[in-house]
Structures are given as C-alpha cells and as structure tokens.
Amino acid sequence: MDLAEKLDAVEEIKKLKARYFRFVDTRQFDALRALFIPDATFDGKEAGMGILPDLDAFIAGCEGGLKGCVSVHHGHCPEIELTSETTATGIWPMEDMLKWEEGAASPVRSLHGMGHYHERYEKHDGHWKIAHWNLTRLRVDTVP
C-alpha cells in the first residue's frame, strides 16, 4: 500500500464509524447492520452489556435498548492502525448521552457515558467493515 492508499483507508474507516454513530442515533438499524461483516463479534461486558453472540443479537439489543430513547453518540480522535491491506484496528474515545421517555422500559431515565470503542476492521468487497466491536466505559452517570 502506498501512502495515498493508506490515507484513503483510514478516511474510509473514519466515515464507517461516523455512519455507525449516526445510524444508531437515527435508528437506521438495517443500515447499521450493513456496517459489519456477517460474522462480527461483540464484547460489551465491560460496559455492562455482556458478550453478544452475533450480529442479530447486537442489532436486537440496539433496537430494544433504545426504544423510547433519544441518544447522541460521539467518537473523537481515533487511533487507526492498518495491520495489512485488508485489516485494521481502531480505538475511539467516545461519549454518549441517552434519555428515555417516561414509561420506557429502561431502568434509568438518563445515561451519560464516557469510554472507548476498541474495534477491528476488515475490507470486504472493496469496503471497510467492522469485524469486532468492544465498548469499555471509564465513567457512567445515570439518573434513576
């Protein structure tokens, strides 16, 4: 890979993650699903979400957990490392704010979280996709 190809790859991965945040917050779950390889893995145990067995469980968890919720997810200052022409890793400092409406199934009314996404990416059919998703939290503030 020459320098231009490396820069293009990093920029495409940044756009991939930007779409992830937007699709979660705008509840575009079919579009969200398309950002992952079919056999992606999901580890949310450090964030209180457990290990999710597959992409279907991840999408279902997003749909169910965000019912009656307004959410805003941000990722900043990514550290992206290309490990080959078709693989990469990334660490994204993150912040999310979620507020559930009265009567929603959530045990809390609001959540403000800060932490990191640790991800692996693979290039499939000419496009970068998320292969592994891991959310860790440094701090979570909630209102019951």
Image (cartoon, rainbow, N blue to C red):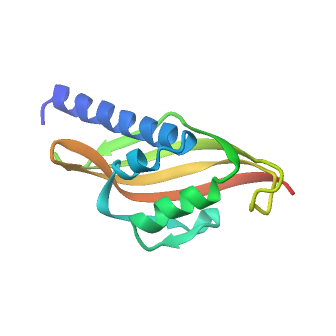
Question: Which of these two is toward me, 104 or 138?
Answer: 104
Residue 127 position within the rendered picture, expressed as x and y whole percent measured from the top left? 22, 42
Q: Is residue 14 above or below residue 65?
A: above
Question: Which of these two is toward me, 29 or 52?
Answer: 29
Image quarter where the C terminus lies is bottom right
Q: Please tell me which residue is depicted at 48% across the width and 63% down the height of the picture.
A: 58
Quadrant position of residue 62: bottom right
Residue 95 position within the rendered picture, expressed as x and y whole percent measured from the top left? 63, 42
Residue 37 horizontal side relative to residue 30, left or right: left
Question: Which of these two is toward me, 14 or 39?
Answer: 39
Residue 9 horizontal side relative to residue 33, left or right: left
Residue 104 position within the rendered picture, expressed as x and y whole percent measured from the top left? 76, 56
Residue 120 position within the rendered picture, expressed as x and y whole percent measured from the top left? 35, 54
Residue 79 horizontal side relative to residue 8, left or right: right
**Looking at this rendering, what residue extends furthest in the front direction?**
103
Quadrant position of residue 2: top left
Image quarter where the N terminus lies is top left
